[in-house]
Image (cartoon, helix red, strand yellow):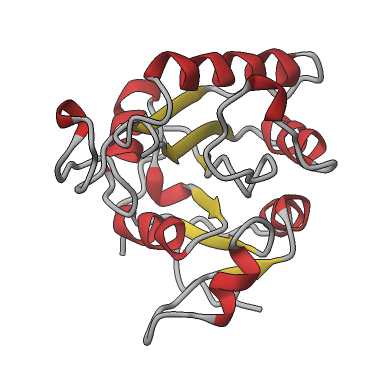
């Protein structure tokens, strides 16, 4: 069982593309950033409940030379602007620019931050005073679920983005705490759950 530190805040760690916003492939223009209709309500509810909100996203387009790091930060700035307007600001943005087969040498290779490796959550926990054992990870791919498992968090797979496709192709032996249609359904599950430890038999 993961150690619970009550002095640290619980968080919801969120994948970006396919979870909060529509996955358009390699997003390459800010005007392509389209939030799902329920995303702002879901994030606002989680924030009001006391959760820190943290984006954790693989951005291998940087390693592939398709987008620049500055563009990713520009997108996150626009996302934050929209969310701040509705009381749903993100507390931290973490992204991995690496890929083992990247064409940009600087970002080519294995790393500790590319999901499902735990580096982004470990960094956020240190920077923001968060307790992964009291936290949740939500995403539309099995690597998001595996990320949550790597840090002792509760994991939810959402069916938006790649989620429905991933659900049908579950790796052998792969466990997930819950599968939800979308982020607002995942939010309802989180807000109705009072457990901070123990068995996590939430899977639907």
- Say which quadrant the C terminus sits in: bottom right
> Residue 43 vs residue 29: left or right?
right
- Say which quadrant the N terminus sits in: bottom left
**Within the image, what quadrant is residue 25 found in?**
top right
In terms of depth relative to the viewer, which is nearer, 119 or 19?
A: 19
Q: Residue at x 40, y 20 (%)?
A: 68
> Residue 111 vs residue 170: left or right?
left
Q: Position of residue 158 (x, y in %)?
A: 64, 61
> Residue 153 vs residue 157: left or right?
left
In terms of depth relative to the viewer, which is nearer, 142 or 127?
A: 142
Q: Is residue 7 above or below residue 136?
A: above
Q: Residue at x 60, y 72 (%)?
A: 165
In terms of depth relative to the viewer, which is nearer, 45 or 176?
A: 176
In terms of depth relative to the viewer, which is nearer, 134 or 157?
A: 157
Q: How many marks?
A: 0
Q: Residue at x 69, y 29 (%)?
A: 33
> Residue 100 vs residue 199: left or right?
left
Q: Position of residue 182 (x, y in %)?
A: 73, 57
Q: Is residue 79 above or below residue 169?
A: above
Q: Residue at x 59, y 35 (%)?
A: 51
Q: Is residue 173 above or below residue 4?
A: below
Q: Position of residue 65 (x, y in %)?
A: 33, 30
Q: Position of residue 106 (x, y in %)?
A: 16, 26
**Within the image, what quadrant is residue 7 found in?**
top left
Q: Residue furthest bottom?
A: 172
């Amino acid at each position: 069982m993961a150690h619970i530190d009550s002095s640290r805040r619980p968080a919801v760690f969120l994948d970006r593309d396919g979870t909060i916003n529509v996955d358009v492939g390699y997003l390459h223009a800010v005007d392509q950033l389209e939030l799902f209709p329920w995303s702002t309500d879901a994030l606002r509810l989680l924030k009001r409940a006391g959760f820190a909100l943290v984006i954790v996203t693989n951005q291998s387009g940087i390693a592939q030379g398709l987008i620049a790091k500055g563009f990713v930060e520009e997108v996150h700035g626009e996302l934050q602007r929209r969310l701040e307007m509705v009381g749903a600001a993100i507390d931290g943005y973490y992204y991995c620019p690496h890929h083992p087969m990247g064409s940009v040498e600087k970002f080519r290779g294995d790393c500790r931050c590319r999901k499902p490796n735990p580096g982004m959550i470990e960094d956020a926990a240190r920077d923001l005073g968060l307790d992964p054992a009291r936290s949740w990870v939500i995403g539309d791919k099995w690597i998001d679920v595996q990320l949550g498992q790597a840090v002792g968090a509760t994991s939810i797979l959402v069916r938006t983005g790649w989620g429905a496709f991933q659900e049908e192709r579950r790796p052998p032996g792969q466990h997930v705490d819950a599968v939800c249609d979308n982020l607002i359904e995942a939010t309802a599950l989180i807000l109705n759950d009072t457990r901070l430890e123990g068995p996590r038999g939430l899977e639907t």
